[in-house]
Amino acid sequence: MMPVSKWRQVLAVPLGAILHGMNSLPESLRDMLRPGEEALAHLEPDLDENSRFANSHLLLTDQRLLCRGHDGSLGEWPRRDGLVLERFDHAGTGHLELKDETSLIASWRYTLGRDQAARELVMRFRGNEPESAQTDEQASIPVSPRALLRLWRFARPYRGKLLSGFLLSLASTAAAMIPPYLTMPLMDDVLIPFQNGKAIDIPLVERYLGGLFAAALIAWALGWARTYILARVSERIGADLRIATYRHLHGLSLEYFGGKRTGDLVARIGSETDRINVFLSLHLLDFATDLLMIGMTAAVLLSINPMLALVTLLPLPFIVWMIHAVRDKLRHGFEQADRVWSEITNVLTDTIPGIRVVKAFAQEEREVKRFVDANAHNLAVNDRVNTVWSLFAPSVTLLTEIGLLVVWIFGIWQVSTSKITVGVLTAFLAYITRFYSRLDSMSRIVSVTQKAAAGAKRIFEILDQSSSVPEASKPVHPGRVEGSIEAKDIEFRYGSRAILHGVDLSISPGEMIGLVGQSGSGKSTLINLICRFYDPARGAILVDGRDIRSYPIEEYRQNIGLVLQEPFLFFGTIAENIAYGKPDASMEEIVSAARAAHAHEFILRLPFGYDSLVGERGQTLSGGERQRISIARAILIDPRILILDEATSSVDTETEREIQGALDNLVSGRTTIAIAHRLSTLRRADRLVVMEKGRIVEIGRHDDLLEAKGVYYRLHEAQQVKENA
Amino acid sequence: MLELSKNAFGRLVLGQAEVAPVRAFPVTNPQSGISLVDSNGKELAWIANLEDLEMRERKLVEEALQAREFLPEILRLSSVSRHAAPCEWRVETDKGKTAFKLDSEDDIRRISSSLVVTDSHGVSFLIRDPAALDRHSRRLLGSFL
């Protein structure tokens, strides 16, 4: 199956090229084409009449509609007047129906991935040109399994420092090689001659011991410099990574946040970046040093006595093999352990903000049980990992002990046959003890690498996420917009659920529109599209006659004021909260916005006035007060387009009256779209737009709509009954 | 031009109404934005800046503010009983020496560049600029931030 976008290009070129491009078109269908017949569109319905997966082919030409069924059967329908092709979708599958005046002739079904092709086919069938692509499909970047290597992007700026750190490692490791080497002459030239009755050569001993001390001092100084430089660098890489992830997160559309849980994101940005950081600064550093050490030790050993060196290095391949064998098993285990860990934090982030609900329904025990369950799951997963892991480390130790034993056996035999001196054996044992102690710690790199790789993978999952509301490649700066809004044939779906079907609406500058309809009718979705929190699947929203996708998102949103049902106040002072959209606002601007929002006087009653802290840990405010602060926030940025999403639904009628005054100040002179359940709050609206099941069903003034006795009338009646009851 | 006076009860009067002066930004901008509100909290007048007033009226407003407000500014921390809350602080403020109990580190709140410390009884103390405190005070304060 070719990607849809490719098909669009194909369809724009003449017949020969089309046929050439239609590689997937079966011969039998191709053969049916008459000379001069022009292929217009092609669709591969992938479901049969029983909704089982089965590929068939549908080809539209300028003369006929051709079909090759999944069983190889062929069909053809010459195009004529009265023949209609209809497309609709339901529960994730699309349907095409070919009908004439009297009956259904044929039908096809497909999964929605082919919807674009189906729409084009229908458009072509009706004799229209299909619309050009609105957004190019984004190439999905495959997540590399070597996620850790991708960290290089963050390490690059520090490559100079990294190089100097590496050189220091090299030097300090070399310095650490010296002491065991000096044990050789100490043994052979000093101690053994002494045992054989020769006096100790004091100046020689002084030289050797001095050398030992100097080597230790140099190794200490170099090691310090190395650790200092590399730890600093990795701390910075960690911080860069964290900031990049957080910044990227802010660029993503609401769609991404809808599908993620807070705890999971907090864990990724917080602890995963820290884990990577620790890995870089400690483990990777140690590992590199160890590798150098092993290389150098091997070189020194080989230069002293190749035979003994080979025996000494014998267990190394076994250990390498063991590490490799356990790697995969551990990686899956650690990834799983991470996911389970997010599960635990998710329980916390779910419950703590919802604590009132938990308590009100007396579900503390259940929440504790949920936590216990998550912990049990965590334990089970970790136990499984630890079974492998716990066996791993002692096995490495055992192998190293055996290795040491081999050296002893071989060494004693060699000494007894006078092939090597005691000094050489001592030096070998000194080297090999260090060597193996490092091997032991090196084996730990497996788990930390896997953990860090799992962490890096989870970080890059965020970084690889491209926003589903992409920035325009050639943006047009909107400046301060006039405020006309036009929705053209908008269609939108969440997953397979279609929310809006072909919504058309045009709003003139300064007009106030009331959006009404039952919940689930698509009101909030329409508003989200106008704010460009999402992009429509089809159609476009024009502001000042231009597609909003051509504006830079940030500049466009500066024209929009949003007042939500549940106003969100950030931790900070009231003044800071009011000035959220315009941080450099002056004191006078803040106060006058608060006045217009009818918030000034209640703010003055607070102990610290505008300097009172609100939000988490701050002053508690009532719903109406919070709402008025959020209205002041919207007034301050003086937006051309104002969106009120159930702004008064969460407060009582008395408070609503107060807020209404504030809203009236806000609305005047701006293009306003207000959603409200309580129809009475929309009295000032110039027009009411009634939505039902993702469609606009009525538009008009309050009185006209009542007279029409349609959907609005029914909604209104239902509320009258409720209010009078 | 405000018609301010003081009545026999020592209250500030605007025209006929008893009013109380309220600072809109007591911490970040105390000299600007003072509202005169009546006993119901309704704003009757707004003073954008104290310096705009005539001397006599300014004095009246300042006196009324003085009588109404209590936000001692901590000038120096003499000692703390422990380096973690709960503990007792001995401080020197612009209103004299005092001691108070701090329940939790959460009761030290940052408001722009200043700190507001609320004691166990709900009395607030202001540290206008923590960086401007002397070394000893800064060191004591540091363990709570």
Image (cartoon, grey):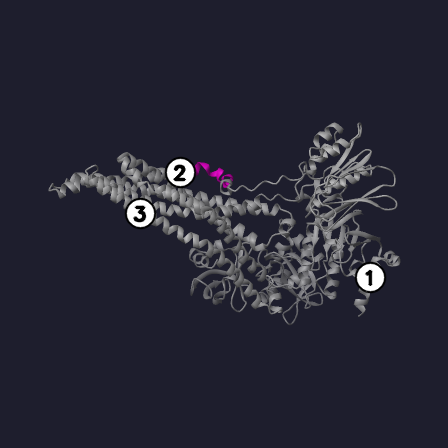
SS assignment at label 1 = helix
Asked if disc 1 and disc 3 are in contact, CB closer than 8 Å, the reply is no
Q: Is B116 displayed left or right of A493 in the figure? A: left
Q: Read off the residue under disc 2.
A: A166
> Looking at the image, which residue is at 42% across and 57% down?
B136
Q: Is B61 located above or below residue A438 in the figure?
A: below
- For disc 2, the chain is A
Residue A402: numbered disc: 3
Is B84 magenta? The answer is no
Of labels 1 and 3, the one closer to you: 3
What predominant SS class does the magenta segment belong to? Answer: helix
- For disc 3, the chain is A
Q: Is A30 located above or below residue A447 in the figure?
A: above
> Looking at the image, which residue is at 59% across and 57% down?
A571
The lab-note entry on whether marks 2 and 1 share a chain reads yes
Of labels 3 and 2, the one closer to you: 3
SS assignment at label 2 = helix
10 Å neighbourhood of mark 3: few (<14), some, or many (≥20)?
Answer: few
Q: Quadrant of residue A605?
A: bottom right
**Which residue is nearer to you in this view: B99 or A207?**
A207
User: x, y (%) of residue A92?
Assistant: 71, 49
Q: Is A357 displayed left or right of B102 in the figure? A: right
- Check disc 1 and give the amino acid type: His
Q: Is A48 located above or below residue A163 in the figure?
A: below
- Check disc 2 and give the amino acid type: Phe
> In the rendered structure, which segment of residues is drawn in magenta?
A151-166
Q: Is A7 displayed left or right of A241 in the figure? A: right
User: x, y (%) of residue B42?
Assistant: 70, 64
The disc, 3 or 2, on the residue closer to the chain's N-terminal end is 2
The disc, 2 or 1, on the residue closer to the chain's N-terminal end is 2
CA separation in Å, label 1 and label 3: 88 Å
Q: Read off the residue under disc 1.
A: A716
